[in-house]
């Protein structure tokens, strides 16, 4: 029998052991984060306007991610002819979750911001698992003392509501809040479709602030290369992904599903291209609500997308 990299150490199958993201080490000391990339959960869904349940998103994504724990050999992609996430050079940790104070949006968001700032202080890339899309607000705020960046949103909804009945920090507000930050130099919003969370004046407001907006149909009609021309090259990017950007046929487990969405490879190819034309400095993936999908495929989709994106971020960062 030919020797292989599994001959030494534990086999460590997906269903064995403690359930961290990708089965990477758990780091409970946020004052001493030693990693190139750190995953943190933000299980907050009090900003939801319709179906709640995304508070269970981080837990379900972690569980699904164990399927893609590549162990000793890394993750070889025969189409790219690249081994992503090789075990000898990959430094990823799971920090667990930000502390969530039920019914207290302000304090919960402060705790999420605190965690992201600790990751940035350690010079690591933050990957945050939501939670509803309001958790993007403290994630972006954590970059207040960092260099400027371009924000890329992949989502079914524009999320550009300024204020509604006094609510400014719900899951319909994050892109509007981000647009107010001087260090956010522009925004590309992709996948926006159907009856939206934002009225006409919100779209006008977004465009007046320099946002480029594309529906799924516009994305397909224009093609990936034309979309990439709109995104400024050689810049720092923060990427926020709402799982409802995907079609409900593959992502039913979300609070506000919207038909006519993306399929897996459309988004993976978009992320791959974005990662190669700039520097990804952070990412969040939000709105996975696993209880609405008994097949568990939404959580698997989220985990698989993140693992592939993370592999590419680290690979191109180290070239």
Image: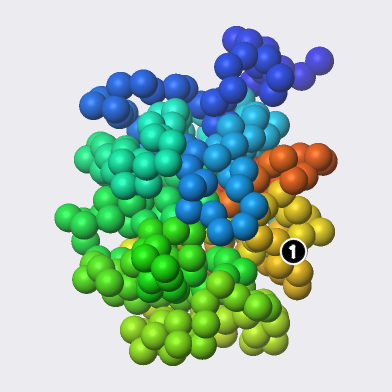
- Determine crowd level at label 1: few under 14, some 14-19, many 20+ residues with C-alpha closer than 10 A: some
Looking at the rendered image, the quarter that the N terminus falls into is: top right
Q: Decide if residue 58 is in sight here.
A: yes
Q: Evaluate whether residue 78 shows in this view.
A: no
Q: Which of these two is toward me, 315 or 145?
A: 145
Percent of width and height locating residue 5? 64, 21
Residue 20 pos. (x, y %): 54, 26
Outermost residue toward the top in this view: 9
**Foreground pick, 192 / 8:** 192
Q: Residue at x 56, y 72 (%)?
A: 197
Using the image as rendered, state which of residue 46 and residue 175 is in the foreground: 46
| Left or right for 316, reference 154 | left
Mark 1, secondary structure of its residue: loop
Residue at 62% over, 14% down: 17
Q: Where is residue 192 in the image (x, y as percent from the top left)?
A: 60, 75
Q: Is residue 206 above or below residue 269?
A: below
The residue under the point 45% across, 82% down is 202
Most extreme residue toward the front, as rendered? Answer: 165
Q: In this view of the protein, which residue sits in the foreground, 64 or 164? A: 164
Residue 177 figure quarter = bottom left
The residue that appears at 21% across and 57% down in the rendered structure is 144
Total of numbered circles in the picture?
A: 1
Tell me how the rendering is colored.
rainbow
Residue 231 picture location, percent across and down: 44, 77
The answer to whether residue 49 is above or below residue 259 is above
According to the picture, the residue beneath numbered tag 1 turns out to be 247
């Amino acid at each position: 029998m030919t020797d292989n990299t599994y001959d030494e150490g534990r086999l460590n199958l997906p269903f064995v052991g403690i359930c961290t993201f990708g089965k990477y080490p758990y780091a409970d000391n946020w004052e001493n984060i030693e990693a190139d990339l750190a995953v943190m959960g933000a299980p907050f869904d009090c900003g939801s306007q319709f179906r709640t349940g995304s508070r269970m998103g981080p837990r379900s994504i972690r569980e699904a991610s164990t399927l893609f724990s590549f162990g000793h050999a890394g993750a070889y992609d025969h189409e790219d002819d690249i081994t992503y996430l090789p075990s000898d050079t990959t430094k990823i940790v799971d920090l667990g979750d930000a502390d969530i104070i039920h019914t207290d949006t302000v304090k919960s968001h402060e705790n999420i911001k605190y965690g992201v700032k600790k990751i940035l202080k350690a010079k690591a890339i933050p990957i945050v698992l939501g939670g509803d899309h309001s958790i993007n607000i403290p994630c972006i705020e954590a970059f207040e003392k960092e260099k400027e960046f371009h924000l890329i949103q992949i989502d079914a909804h524009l999320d550009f509501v300024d204020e509604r009945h006094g609510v400014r920090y719900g899951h319909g507000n994050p892109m509007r809040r981000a647009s107010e930050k001087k260090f956010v130099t522009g925004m590309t919003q992709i996948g926006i479709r159907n009856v939206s969370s934002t009225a006409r004046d919100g779209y006008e407001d977004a465009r007046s602030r320099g946002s480029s907006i594309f529906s799924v149909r516009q994305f397909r009609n224009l093609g990936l290369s034309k979309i990439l021309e709109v995104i400024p090259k050689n810049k720092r990017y923060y990427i926020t992904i709402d799982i409802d950007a995907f079609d409900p046929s593959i992502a039913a487990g979300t609070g506000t599903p919207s038909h006519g969405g993306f399929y897996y490879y459309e988004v993976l190819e978009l992320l791959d291209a974005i990662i190669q034309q700039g520097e990804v400095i952070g990412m969040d993936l939000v709105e996975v609500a696993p209880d609405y999908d008994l097949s568990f495929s939404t959580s698997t989709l989220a985990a698989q997308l993140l693992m592939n994106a993370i592999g590419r971020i680290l690979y191109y960062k180290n070239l």
